[in-house]
Amino acid sequence: MTTTDTPAFPSGTILGYPRIGRRRELKKAVEAFWAGRIDAAELEATAAGLRQATRERLSSLGLGRTDSSIPESFSFYDQVLDAQVAVGAIPARFADLVDGDGHLDLAGYFTLARGAGDNLPLEMTKWFDSNYHYLVPEIGPETHFHLASDRIVREFEEAVANGFITRPVIVGPVTLLLLAKPSSDAPAGFHPLDRLADLLPVYAELIERLAAAGAQWVQLDEPGLVSESIDIPRDETLAALAQAYDALGGLTTRPALFVAAPYGSLDDALPVLVATPVEAIGLDLVRGTVPTIVPGLADVTLVAGVIDGHNIWRGDLAGAFDTLGELSALSENIAVSSSTSLQHLPHDVEDETKLAAELTGWLAFADQKIGQVATLARGLTSGLSAIRAELDAATASLADRRGSPGVRDGAVRARLDTLTPADFSRGDYETRLAAQSQALRLPPLPTTTIGSFPQTGDIRRARARLVSGELAAEDYRDVMRAEIGRVVQLQEDLGLDVLVHGEPERNDMVQYFAENLDGFAVTENGWVQSYGSRCTRPSILWGDVSRPQPITVEWSSYTQTLTEKPVKGMLTGPVTILAWSFVRDDQPLGDTARQVALALRDEITDLEAAGIQVVQVDEPALRELLPLKKRDHAHYLDWSVGAFRLATAGVADRTQIHTHLCYSEFGAVIDAIRNLDADVTSIEAARSKMEVVQDIQTSGFDHGIGPGVYDIHSPRVPGVAEITELLERALQSIPARQVWVNPDCGLKTRGYAETVASLGNIVDATRAVRATLV
Ligand code: GLN
Ligand code: ZN
């Protein structure tokens, strides 16, 4: 391709759009397929309908129908899984799912994500600094790359057949390999990036196929370039980048290439990318800043990600337009876009009928963000005067928000001002341990769960009836108490040691607290995809946070009346409450976190006073909020760890504080986890077969630790032998006195059949291993 025949990049675009559907249609269809209620053809038809509805919607919001401004960003489960499947990177253990031509059908595709029988699913982990989870590719020296799926071509052709020229989107080759882990048969020292030269021809073939189908632009997402938390020397990453885009850019028959780098700034990757033949580069100017000039930049289209794809605030539109002005000093070809895919946002503020009108005016969900992109794009082509009214309206809304009562609460601020270092510290661990051992009298290798038990249809229906007013509050409480009674009895029967109430009364671990704290609002339809078919409805933290009254105390103390065993009180930690909400952007996150921490501290004090001896403060999101740039880590860890300590340091020595983290990649945060100073920390470990315990050992972690022995992300029941082996592996690295036994995470998404079987196996395995301890 020569520059003269490069099609113009559209003046306004977004990097991607939510795919789960305005009313979660895709979730429902996928789950119906899994349950056998619909077949693959019906699922495909639903998906095609959703894709077409999306294209129509995006064009009605201001993106062009035939100028490649609409991204073709659908996925049945995950975009990283799609890319692995497209290039044929199917782990050997799934070889049976692949037909003679190397293709995987829809059922096989989902099996990679969900596992089957003894075949563990692909590992899942957080996507950059979002709350989205992707499936980790497994790539080894033997992985046979070939174009195994042309779904992306077919979806583009489907768009054409419907009158659209869209822009296919795929995870780029460098990021795909950076995010991959070596397959289990790979020799030591192998990294998937070693396979780049073998992978590139497959991307080349795909790109050529898209050209033949009529695609004008293709978007390759390379967020791997902005992250420093990937264990590959930077110069190797940059060399791979040059190699990849020199090769793909050198193809003679291809669409124009748009390489997007969301979630941060490209830094030293920018000059490298500019030196390749790619035609457009996407910059995240919300997380990053306008780059300094580099040679050749003026010849590239700079796609300015100035509209925050990560957050729901209407924001400073005039400021965004100024940024476009700064950028136009670097290149004549400027376009405007969202900073990231809008997959992290709910669809439409218009779908919210119960939010205060004032708040609604401060918000922009995906559809409103597209309106903002369209406005700025108009400003780019027609000048400031064409959009002045929109910019002024956004500025006025910002001023209105700043001055609104509730955004600043004097009492909350005064209390924060009086804190001293003692408020953040619990004192000596060994002293606490002795007091707790005496109070709790637990066996070695104590067993517990992470908190939630299956959220059955009955529980959900009762909650729906409470919300609709069909069920009175007292009757709802009775239904929940009956459920708690069953969960306690089950745990007694199974022989677990530290019991939980099962969290039946919680719709969601963050939303539940948001509903009970001042400073938050909750949405009706604000669903975003978390992983696969799983969606969450993040709350909106808009003002100063305080606790009008106790939240969980009644539930926990009721539960404690049902059993002699210790009942663990369950709270969600300040960092996780922030991470899984849409948080105000008008003050530092650390200030907001301390407000939440104080509210939780009061709750923990009340739980302790009510006789609860163990309190778990979940911080599954601690690592997820870790900034992608190492230079920002220390500051983040300081405020996040501080908030946890502020929440938990108000208790007596004998009260045992647990925390739970939903992942196993500890590298960058292991010191922070030690600094949390929780008495017991449960983590995910089953999918990665306890690999993590070595890191824990080397770090010198000496508090209680519960490496998960049951991967709750899949319906698979782990056998006693398997759990025993995992436990024995843990005990090779960690002294038995530190080890707790628990699943990887809460059980709310599981059914009762597999839960009971799995927990039974956990207790049996623990007893067997206990018997071998001296
Ligand atoms: N206590 C929560 C539960 O069990 C923890 C969930 C989580 O870590 N994501 O559901
Ligand atoms: Zn978890």
Image: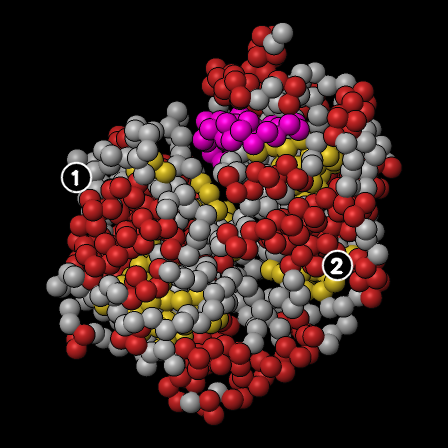
Residue under pointer 1: 101
Q: Nearer the viewer, residue 405 or 699?
A: 699
104 displayed left or right of 500: left
Q: Nearer the viewer, residue 406 or 523?
A: 406
Q: Quadrant of residue 762?
A: top right
Residue under pointer 2: 545
Residue type beneath disc 2? Val
Q: Is residue 308 above or below residue 458?
A: below
Q: Which residues are magenta?
A: 686-715
Task: Give coordinates of residue 284: x percent, y percent.
Answer: 44, 65
* The residue positioned farthest toward the right in the image shown: 609
**Residue 694 belongs to magenta span:** yes
Residue pictured at 57% horizontal, 86% vertical: 392
Q: CA distance from mark 1 to mark 2?
A: 58 Å
**How dense is the environment of label 2, judged by Cα within 10 Å: few (below 14), some, or many (20 and up)?**
many
698 displayed left or right of 17: right
537 displayed left or right of 565: left
Q: Residue 499, can we see it?
A: yes
Q: Helix, strand, or loop for circle 2?
A: strand
